Image: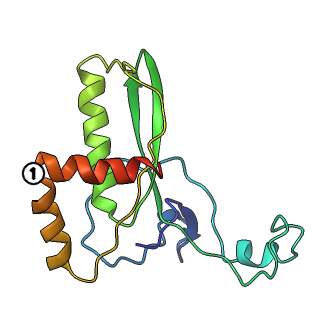
Amino acid sequence: MTVGMSMMTMSSSSSKKIPAVAVALDFPLCPPTKVVKPHPLSHRCWKKTRSNHELHGVLPSVGFVQIPMGVAGPLLLDGREYTVPMVITEGCLVASTNRGCKAIYALGGATRVLLRDGMTRALILRFGSAKRATELKFNLENLVNFKKLAVIFNKYV
């Protein structure tokens, strides 16, 4: 989907203002639950930013990429309302998340608990085939083999 969750106003022949959304879809459209605040969007925004200074020093500049973004919410979490921005190409997921936020809100909100704060690092294994990766997976189900590999991996992590 190529859309910026934007709305523009177009004049019809009868001089009435009608909302229009510019959308190019590559998947089935879910009906939106509600539209976020209207925001003017035009092709002129592509012409405004041309200099490298305006691109925060990106050299060489080759252009811009439009990223589809939706907003779900409000999500009531710990007594505060949050909107949930989602950059995703699966538009139905935004609508689904929005319905989940609505259900959580109707039930009085959610409470979070932090069990541990940290960062995880892991080595990446690359195999020539799925068959070879599966062989290792089954081999590691044996605790002795798992411990041998863990000793080797722990040297690098």
Residue visible at 38% across and 67% down?
89
Q: Is residue 155 visible?
A: yes
Image location (x, y in percent) of residue 139: 12, 61
Q: In the figure, is residue 137 to the left or right of 71?
A: left
| Image mark count | 1
Say which element carries label 1.
Answer: loop
Residue situated in front as seen by the camera: 24 or 146: 146
Query: Is the residue 2 above or below the residue 157 in the image?
Result: below
Q: Given the image, on which type of amino acid does mark 1 rest?
A: Asn
Specify few, some or many for label 1: CA neighbours under 10 Å numbering under 14, 14-19, or 20 or more: few
Image location (x, y in percent) of residue 134: 14, 69
Residue situated in front as seen by the camera: 146 or 128: 146
Residue situated in front as seen by the camera: 140 or 74: 140
Q: Is residue 15 visible?
A: no
Residue visible at 52% across and 63% down?
4
Image location (x, y in percent) of residue 23: 43, 73
Q: Quadrant of residue 104?
A: top left
Q: Locate the N terminus by quadrant.
A: bottom left
Query: Is the residue 69 above or below the residue 26 in the image?
Result: above
Which residue does the numbered mark 1 point to in the structure image?
142
Residue situated in front as seen by the camera: 98 or 114: 114
